[in-house]
Amino acid sequence: MRFVVRRLLAMIPTLWVVATITFFMIRLAPGGPFQSEREIPAEAKAALEQAQAVFGRDLPLVPLFFDKATYAHSQRVANVKVDALFFTRLEEIELVAEEAGGP
C-alpha cells in the first residue's frame, strides 16, 4: 500500500514537469498558427495582430503559463470554455455507447 501511495505522490510533480516542458516547447517553437511562408498583405496585418491578442500569442511566456484563463477557453470554438465542450462530448459518447449496447 505504501508503494502505491508513494508512486501516486511521485506522479504529481512528474506530470507538472511534463506539462511545463510541453508548454514552453510549444510556445518557443519558431513560427505560429498565424504565420505563413508568404508575405501577409498589409490590410490583413491588423486582423493578424488582433487574432494574436485574442489567443494570447502576444503575452510574455511566464505570466501566460500561470494564467488560468489561457487553459479555460477553446481556441477552436469562440467564447466557449473547454470544460463545457468536454462534458458535452462526453455525454454524446455515453449516448452512442448506450445505443451500441456498451456499459
Image: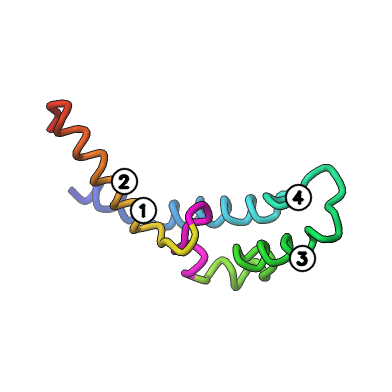
Kind of residue sitting beneath label 2: Arg
Q: Over which residues does the magenta segment extend?
A: 68-77
* Mark 1 neighbour class, 10 Å CA radius: few under 14, some 14 to 19, many 20 or more: few
Give the colour scheme shown: rainbow
Farthest residue in the front direction?
43
Q: Position of residue 32 (x, y in %)?
A: 71, 51
Element class at badge 1: helix
- Decide if residue 91 is on the left or right side of residue 45: left
Whichever of labels 2 and 4 marks the residue nearer the N terminus, that label is: 4
Disc number placed over residue 89 in the picture, else none: 2
Q: Are marks 2 and 1 in contact (CB under 8 Å)?
A: yes
Kind of residue sitting beneath label 4: Gln
Decide whether the magenta segment is chiefly helix, strand or loop. Answer: loop
Q: Is 88 situated above or below 99? A: below
Residue with the mark numbered 4: 35
| Residue drawn at point x = 40 percent, y = 57 percent | 82
| Residue drawn at point x = 73 percent, y = 60 percent | 48
Disc number placed over residue 85 in the picture, else none: 1
* Mark 2 neighbour class, 10 Å CA radius: few under 14, some 14 to 19, many 20 or more: few
Q: How much space separates mark 3 and mark 4, taking CA atoms?
A: 13 Å
Q: How much space separates mark 2 and mark 1, taking CA atoms?
A: 6 Å
Kind of residue sitting beneath label 1: Leu
Q: Quadrant of residue 102?
A: top left
Tell which of 43 and 13 is nearer to you: 43
* Mark 4 neighbour class, 10 Å CA radius: few under 14, some 14 to 19, many 20 or more: few
Element class at badge 3: helix
